[in-house]
Image (cartoon, helix red, strand yellow):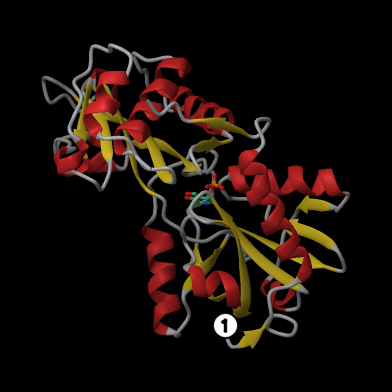
Amino acid sequence: MTPPMTQLIAALPPLDEHHVDRRRHPHGVAFMDGQYLPMSEAKISVLDWGFLHSDATYDTVHVWNGRFFRLDLHLERFFRGIERLRMKLPYDREKIASILNNCVALSGHRSAYVEMICTRGSSPTFSRDPRQAENRFIAFAVPFGSVANKEQLERGLHVAISETVRIPPKSVDPAIKNYHWLDLVKGLYDAYDRGAETALIVDTNGHIAEGPGFNVFVVKEGSLRTPAYGVLPGITRRTVFDLCANIGLSATAADIGGAEIKGADEVFITSTAGGIMPVTRIDDAAIANGRVGPVTRRLMDLYWQKHDDPAWSTAVSYP
Ligand code: PLP
């Protein structure tokens, strides 16, 4: 059971930031401009380059049963993105980890979706020079969310392959996690038009790339493959590689064509928003016998087991 908010606040370390009363805002807690706020009050200026130009990077980590999953990898990817976009933050990794912890602790959620964002910000003189902008850090913790709902996790998702091309890596480096999602959202509408539940879009060579918020894997004759080019190197994707190494399954990153994915024995998608999620239908065809396959099930089980393992997860410090 979650302790009362007053206890939560009283037990938090004395920070310079203000704290909020969660009884008024159960949907989550944000941190910005040095303060913890209810989600409904976390707002940025319309002049922020993050809003006007998608000039931002972010990362999302989840908390499951009161533990962050692979927080170190998420922080590493976030800080690499900030550096490559030539942004600067006044906080180091430890401080950001403690802010994320406090957002979760203040929200009281045992399972949460936790986002850290760095935007270019805006310039006090409205300069068009990005070097003049004051970069902005925002974090928030909201209840855990998943790409696939409970029913879809049991029976597998129905995915459509859209011909929409993912923004090329030479334009926007996909290793810098970003909000360039117009291609992914177009893919989603294509999928809905065809009666599917979500989408995969293609890379500039016509191979399968990724979907709105997830990577994809195929299983063929016991070996796994995931696209290598033009995709975000997802932490869940990386976790699948690690799990495969643990149990002696072969997993490689290499091109996957449309015919190949439809002819796979099993297909699944991976995301912090839901973990490993089965796909049993692509366009009009069932994958194999249309049921969730044994490799997918085994990896799903292992993935969630690792959430209690201190080598893969860190406890949230709830007061
Ligand atoms: N691909 C894209 C475009 C994403 O936005 C995400 C996550 O949001 C992923 C893949 C999956 O990455 P991760 O496993 O780190 O959540």
Q: Residue at x 52, y 36 (%)?
A: 67
Residue 24, horizontal then vertical, whole percent = 14, 42
Q: Residue at x 40, y 79 (%)?
A: 192
> Farthest residue in the left direction?
125
Q: Amino acid at mark 1?
A: Asp
Residue sitting nearer the eye, 6 or 286: 6
- In the drawing, does residue 236 fall left or right of residue 10? right
Q: Quadrant of residue 157?
A: bottom right
Residue 189, horizontal then vertical, whole percent = 38, 74
> Farthest residue in the bottom direction?
284
Disc 1 within 8 angstroms of ligand 1 (CB) = no
Residue sitting nearer the eye, 4 or 43: 4
Residue sitting nearer the eye, 174 or 126: 174
Q: Residue at x 47, y 18 (%)?
A: 93
Q: Residue at x 30, y 38 (%)?
A: 107
Local packing at callout 1 (Cα closer than 10 Å; few below 14, some 14-19, many 20+) is some
Q: Is residue 117 visible?
A: no
107 to 20, vertically: above or below: below
Image quarter of the C terminus: top left
Q: Quadrant of residue 188?
A: bottom left
Q: Is residue 95 visible?
A: yes
Instruction: Classify mark 1: helix, strand or loop.
Output: loop
238 to 287, vertically: above or below: above
Residue 55, horizontal then vertical, whole percent = 32, 37
**Which residue is the site of mark 1?**
283
152 to 237, vertically: above or below: below
- In the drawing, does residue 315 fall left or right of residue 292? left
